[in-house]
Amino acid sequence: MKRPSQTNLDYFSRLFVISAVTLLSALFAVAANGNTAKPLASPLEGRWDITVDVNGKPAPSWLEVRHSGTKTLVGAFVSVSGSARPISVVNFKDGKFSFAIPPQWEQGDKDFTVEGTLAGDKISGTLTTPEGKTHNWTGVRAPALRRQTPPVWGKPIKLTEGNEMKGWHAEGPNQWIAENGILRSPKSGANLVTDQKFTDFKLHAEFRIPKGSNSGVYLRGRYEVQVTDAKGMEPSLDQLGAIYGFLTPSEMVAKEAGEWNSFDVTLVGRMITVAVNGKTVITNQEIPGITGGAIDSNEAEPGPLLIQGDHGPVEYRNLVITPAK
């Protein structure tokens, strides 16, 4: 009998290994398909921009619903104030839903409850605060805001110059002062808002706050980049450089209270990059929705810059915005 050559042995060995691997892969696939069910998509899943009727005045809110496993719906909720808070269970049946969350900034110890009805791409219902006040609300699906092409940047616009607040207005009685290119709020008071609205842009801002003070810059008036006295603190959702309640910076690079700090922010659709004092701490991450204290929940629309002035003294200078064309 003729002995097989080494070449033939190598060929049959490789063929055997390939066949065995293919068979095992097929068996694993069958087992997986037999034992693991795909998550059941719910028509309520997704992000929702909500407007609440608070004593006849519109106030923004936001809801996200997603599945956990195959049967449970969970999510996150932003009320008209405060940060995004998790929802452990969203009850949904026959087009109606409800959930409850503990109080955050509200007074009282009762749960904050929301009830609603789904009708196509719209939702509506009531929310009841821990103080026992009930408000009606309506909501629509939030836009994806995915850009198809990279931005082409236009001409930079300087928002702080000289001793005037040209291009700004206060939301209430104005405590802001313009001095030598610095916008200064000596005490808690009104927020300051640009007259002009923007879509996608790059922003440079420098700011200084005394010990223990707090402020923030709302991009399009809806997404707050936190300004806090945070030297020596761990990064968190409510400290310097965070997108309030949503995105935590990778590290804390704050300077001492009373020193000038800087932001460099790029916002394209929902995607944001933030550098604090020259160090990138958030890199091209998605902002899920509006943050507490937003001017509205109309995320598809352009919006102004809003500087928070109701949380203590703060100063801003060298505010420069470069809009996309």
Image (cartoon, rainbow, N blue to C red):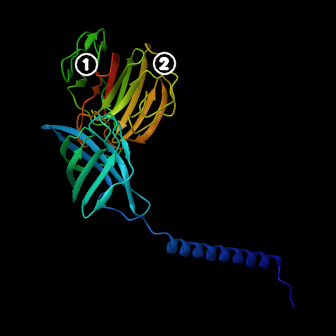
Nearest to N terminus: mark 2 or mark 1:
1
Q: Residue furthest bottom?
A: 1
What amino acid is labelled 1 in the image? Gly
Residue 84 or residue 41, whichever sits in front: 84
Badge 1 local density, few (<14 within 10 Å), some, or many (20+)?
A: many
SS state under label 2? loop
Q: Residue at x 23, y 37 (%)?
A: 296
Residue 211 in the figure: left or right of residue 108: right
Badge 2 local density, few (<14 within 10 Å), some, or many (20+)?
A: some
| Rendered-image quadrant of the C terminus | top left
Is there any visible trace of residue 244 in the rendered image?
Answer: yes
Q: Residue at x 51, y 29 (%)?
A: 234
What amino acid is labelled 2 in the image? Lys
Coordinates of residue 138 in the picture (x, y in percent)? 19, 48
Q: Quadrant of residue 1?
A: bottom right
Residue 260 or residue 78, whichever sits in front: 78
Q: Residue at x 21, y 28 (%)?
A: 196
Residue 189, label in figure: 1
Q: Residue at x 26, y 46 (%)?
A: 49
SS state under label 1? loop
Coordinates of residue 42 in the picture (x, y in percent)? 33, 62
Q: Quadrant of residue 150?
A: top left
Residue 48, label in figure: none
Coordinates of residue 230 in the picture (x, y in percent)? 46, 23
Q: Quadrant of residue 247?
A: top left
Query: Relative to residue 161, is residue 76 depicted above or below?
Result: below
Query: Which residue is tagged 2?
Result: 255
Cα distance in 3D space between marks 2 and 1: 25 Å
Query: Relative to residue 46, is residue 95 depicted above or below?
Result: below
